[in-house]
Image: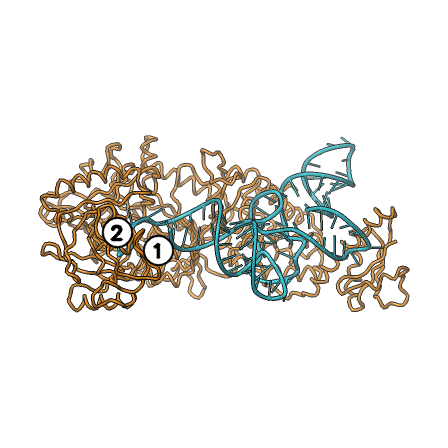
Amino acid sequence: MEYNFKAIESKWQKEWEKKKVFEVKEQKGKKKFYVLEMYPYPSSSGLHMGHALNYTIGDICARFKRMNGFNVLYPMGFDSFGLPAENAAIKAKAHPKKFTEDAIKNYIRQMKEIGLSYDWSRTFASHDFNYYKWNQYFFLKFLEKGLVYRKKAPVNFCRKCESVLANEQVHNGRCWRHEDTEVEIKQLEQWFIKTTKYAEELLKDIENLNWPERIKIMQRNWIGKSHGTEIDFTIDDKSWKIFTTRPDTIFGVTFMVVSAQHLKLMELVTNGQKKDVEKFLKKIKSVSEKEQEEMEKEGVFTGSYAVNPISNEKIPVYAGNFVVADYGSGMVMAVPGHDQRDFEFAKKYQISIKEVIKGENSSIKERAYVNEGVLVNSGKFNGMQSEKAKEEITKYLESKKIGRKKIEYKLKDWLVSRQRYWGTPIPVIYCEKCGIVPVNEKELPVLLPEKVTFGKGNPLTTNEKFVNVKCPKCKGKARRETDTMDTFFDSSWYFLRYCDNKNNKKPFDSAKANYWMPVDQYIGGAEHACMHLIYARFFTKALKDLGFVKIDEPFSKLFNQGMLLGSDGEKMSKSKGNVILPEQVSSKYGIDTARLFLVSVASPDKEVLWSENGIEGSLRFVRKVFDFAEKGKFAQTNKVVESKLNKAIKEITEDIEKFRYNLVVIKLRSLFDSIIEKGVSKKDFEACLKLLAPFCPHIAEEIWHKFGNKSFVSLEKWPEAGKVDENLLKQEENVDKLIDDINNVAKLVKEKQGKEVSKVYVYVIPNEKQGFVNNKNIIEKKTNLAVEIYAVNDKDKHDPQNFSKKAKPGRPALFLE
RNA sequence: GCGGGAGUGUCGGAGUGGUCAAACGAGACAGACUCAAAAUCUGUUGGCUUAGUGCCUGCAAAGGUCCGAAUCCUUUCUCCCGCACCA
């Protein structure tokens, strides 16, 4: 029968669904395994082949674990809130809800067609109020605990999103969704989540994660811990703090720089300098467009002077464009001799440069000397090494109560409010009298109104019904918060909701969550290293402290899949016309073939190049397996094949654990080649099928049933590796080599001597004789010659040229005639 | 600038101290089958050479360590990714 993959695939997809094969519940005493892929944003363009690769990687893992006796939770859902849906909907003049739900339906259909073994009974989408209700609930819990607060701060604003962005969503000074759009800094009052409260824990626990090293490094850098000293400088009788990692250079401070975005900048500006400062602020706003890369350090004198607390020198205070407003205190002590930025600034404004650190051949003529060294021009600290001086100077400042040790982090609090419609409404009410009033928990969810007018900013602000409310406290006139939550809030705990997705009393049942969590294997792209993966870790820790879960890390193990590139080696994109869709491929080759191909090209954590020729090769293999199952002659498995099978089981098991799927495919190919060539028993063939099942589940299921099995191979027990006879395998290799040799010599004889040969005499080392004799048939078959095998010491051997003396272990001598 | 990763045959890619001219796949070539083609099967696929051998070249480039290197070290070049004035 022809390999009709279409019929086979849809048949088994239906069958799995009908029998609820992949649905699971908590089972005491059974080891659980939670496999999860990052839930996708449902785009109207549907799944592309890259998704298929991503999910196939997870599906193989899930199927493998299932067959290995684990209670496997493998769910899928949709990250359905977010700006793209809103914008697309506006463009298409449809409601984002309709738009999104259509896209979800399409995704689910496509996912089922890929044969992914999800437990669909656990699915949900984050735009469903049964889900986002709990976003609001957690928001209120955080508010209660002081983990959410509102403050005015310099924030990143994207003109195209018409909304503020979190720090993590600003890449290279641009919006993460709009690479062409510079973010603007605005002073706005916004909602923040205190991620910084967990900075230390987030940093420390990275160590124990079984994650790719580079992701761990990226997170460490993002959290950016540094040890230093906080020092109080007096400016006009007021104390201003600065943070430095180089207190040893304090005698070299010749000026101070305050960030141009500093909230209290104007307090420092004297009347005389006001004009200049304002002019400067205007200027830096207008140039932000182009000079991102090589922006020159610029500043303006504020008119104020500070006093160096250790040398009592009077030093000018500047406002500068190179000081980050929300790191440390937004103000720095400038040491031009030993910091390159300060050096450039001092040169530009002719401020004096002092040398206070001496290193080997150090000089501060051309540029700052930034390494450590020995202190000079530093009063009683002269001659001290930097390392020691840092300690001593800090101690001295501490004793005078004008300085202290301090640890700073680059990690900032998470700005979660967004001025957009398609997200979870923030459950807060502003009352003229009572101020900020949280919505009563019982009133949740604050529903996102469906009937709104798009086009003029955030549609919620113009929706009177939504906005005008009574104050829950005083019943007076009040106004509802119209900002919605960053969608990263949704994705920060969705993995917990899968554990108990239908609960309408609680976000999830803790016992259930404690059974399934943590996610044992998380799979997704590296682009989330410093966004989703940090937020989700933070959220889990916060929920632990609130008593919702026992775990403090959500994802024990993380796998980053590589990107699928077009056959031209470029990233797939519509404009390049190299996009491959799963439907195109599965209708032509079948999804089993596509799955097999995707994971066979390269190690799944590397880039994968799509290739039309390549997938043809995979189809050849799948068809070969199918044909053999149909027409193959089954016989007792010989010892060699048995050893090969056992070896394959052992190696494939290890390889799947380590995501070396590409190597598994090679081993599967070689295994099936052997059994097809040498024959196999039905029972052993079934073991091979099980090995194939995670990769090509439909065809495996089909053959399994053709063999009269009533169960699902998807739920069968993974084969166990028996004994491997290495000697036998070695002998097999030797026979292969011998066959090559014979053919080679035969060819030479024919070419050189013009002689056709018909018989070959083989002379082997005596103890190897039996091994070769056992394979006599194969040798004859593959060489097309009559074969006579002698041990080299056989007395009656036919050996006219005395070639037998050339025999070596494993390498017999031969004579042809 | 800082940090991370990578450069292997015609191509995609395995391989991280000896069993490596280098798995597997693709492509190409030759043969079998066929009236023919496709599919399928067999063989070849760095060079020279040869009764199955041996030699040379070879894993970005140049050096080095070692009895021995695609694999370790140094320098250089190229590419990819992340962070980016964090004091």
Residue A372 spot, x, y in % from top left: 32, 62
Q: Nearer the viewer, residue A688 or A86?
A: A86
Q: CA distance from mark 2 to mark 1?
A: 24 Å
Could you tell me which secondary element the residue under label 1 belongs to?
Answer: helix
Q: Quadrant of the N terminus of chain A?
A: top right
Mark number for residue A221?
A: 1
The subunit carrying tag 2 is A
Marks 2 and 1, the one that precedes in the sequence: 1
| Chain for colour orange | A
Residue A26's image quarter?
bottom left
Residue A760's image quarter?
bottom right
Above or below residue A666? Residue A6 is above
Residues packed near mark 2 inside 10 Å, few (<14), some (14 to 19) or many (20 plus): many
Going by the numbered disc 2, the residue's amino acid type is Asp
Going by the numbered disc 1, the residue's amino acid type is Asn
| Chain for colour cyan | B
Residue A283 relative to residue A623: left or right = left
Q: Is residue A255 visible?
A: yes
Residue B54's image quarter?
bottom right
Mark number for residue A342?
A: 2
Above or below residue A203? Residue A177 is above
Residue A633 relative to residue A515: left or right = right
Q: Nearer the viewer, residue B67 or A461?
A: B67
